[in-house]
């Protein structure tokens, strides 16, 4: 049972990255690989500031600002230099490896016996439940804030940019600016996941972000499958399904470990699971019309 509770906690900590991927891929139709680097960047900034005894009131804005700057660079390279969005993300992600290593000063920073966001408030005598309550509050705030943003005039302009860029540009909206801001916001959320996971696991590592984009992508695909199946149009419900997708994704990985799958094969299991959830709707659709 503890394995599954840990998986739920990890899934909730990774909700912000899932929301970031949802924003970049489903709102702007941009496959943003910056995610791998900005996630580690969030962890690196968190570890350095906490080891220098900075408060969470300083750490959280600094982490999100760092992630936003990384995303903005990707947006600038894509929109101003007219470089393919995928390549722009790869370039920034590659550069961030050196940036993260420079920030950390070494490949790994432990945070053992240090206060974290999960023990700054005691909502339960059980540490795991206390962590659960705190992370649920954070997730609720993220859903409400992002849901509210996407329903504002600015948010509608963002969504329209992804749906029909030429039409929005004809209406006088600066689509390049929208993309830059959107990618900055997406990577700020990704860095926030790095902030949460670093404290949850008790260390920051230079390689912690390798392949993390597949986690966010898998979470979004799970949500999208349900959204298309039920024909959901509500932004708020869609965001909640993304949260559920992040938790389900981690539960599947936990189940794989419980049944005895070698931990060395976990990345393979992850890739196969994402392939499965991507393929099932298409296979069902083909079967229906064959």
Image (tube, rainbow, N blue to C red):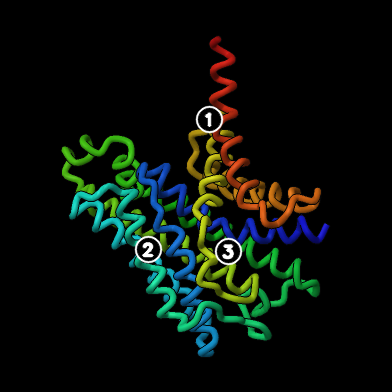
Residue sitting nearer the eye, 88 or 154: 88
For label 1, the SS is helix
* Left or right: where 89 falls relative to 221: left
Q: Which residue lies most toward the right here?
A: 1
User: What is the C-alpha distance between the residues marked 3 and 2?
Assistant: 30 Å
Q: Where's residue 101, x and y in %?
A: 44, 76
Q: Which residue is mark 3?
A: 138
For label 3, the SS is helix
Up-down relation of residue 254 to residue 121 (above or below): above
Q: Residue at x 74, y 48 (%)?
A: 256
Q: Quadrant of the N terminus?
A: bottom right
Q: Residue at x 58, y 14 (%)?
A: 288
Crowdedness of circle 3 by 10 Å Cα count: few (<14), some, many (20+)? Answer: some
Q: Which residue lies most toward the top here?
A: 290
Crowdedness of circle 2 by 10 Å Cα count: few (<14), some, many (20+)? Answer: some
Say whether disc 3 or disc 2 marks the residue closer to the N-terminus: 2
Q: Where's residue 75, x and y in %?
A: 28, 56
Q: Which of the numbered marks, if any, corresponds to residue 94? A: 2
Q: Where's residue 190, x and y in %?
A: 47, 61
């Amino acid at each position: 049972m503890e394995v599954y509770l840990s998986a739920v906690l990890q899934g909730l900590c990774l909700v912000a990255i899932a929301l970031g991927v949802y924003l970049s891929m489903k709102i702007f139709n941009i496959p943003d690989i910056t995610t791998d680097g900005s996630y580690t960047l969030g962890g690196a900034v968190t570890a350095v500031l906490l080891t220098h005894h900075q408060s969470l009131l300083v750490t959280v804005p600094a982490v999100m600002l760092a992630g936003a700057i990384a995303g903005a660079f990707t947006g600038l390279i894509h929109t101003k230099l007219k470089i393919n969005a995928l390549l722009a993300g790869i370039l920034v992600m590659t550069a961030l490896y050196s940036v993260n290593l420079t920030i950390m000063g070494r490949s790994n920073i432990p945070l053992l016996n240090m206060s974290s966001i999960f023990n700054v408030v005691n909502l339960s005598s059980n540490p795991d439940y206390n962590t659960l309550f705190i992370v649920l509050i954070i997730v609720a705030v993220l859903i409400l804030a992002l849901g509210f943003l996407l329903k504002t005039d600015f948010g509608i302009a963002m969504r329209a940019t992804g749906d029909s860029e030429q039409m929005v540009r004809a209406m006088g909206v600066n689509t390049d600016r929208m993309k830059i801001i959107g990618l900055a916001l997406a990577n700020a959320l990704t860095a926030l996941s790095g902030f949460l996971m670093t404290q949850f696991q008790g260390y920051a590592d230079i390689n912690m972000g390798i392949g993390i984009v597949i986690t966010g992508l898998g979470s979004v695909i799970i949500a999208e499958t349900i959204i298309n199946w039920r024909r959901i149009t509500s932004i708020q419900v869609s965001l909640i399904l993304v949260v559920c997708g992040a938790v389900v994704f981690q539960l599947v990985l936990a189940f794989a470990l419980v049944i005895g799958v070698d931990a060395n094969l976990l990345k393979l299991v992850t890739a196969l699971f994402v392939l499965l959830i991507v393929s099932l709707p298409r296979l069902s659709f083909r079967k229906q019309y064959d």
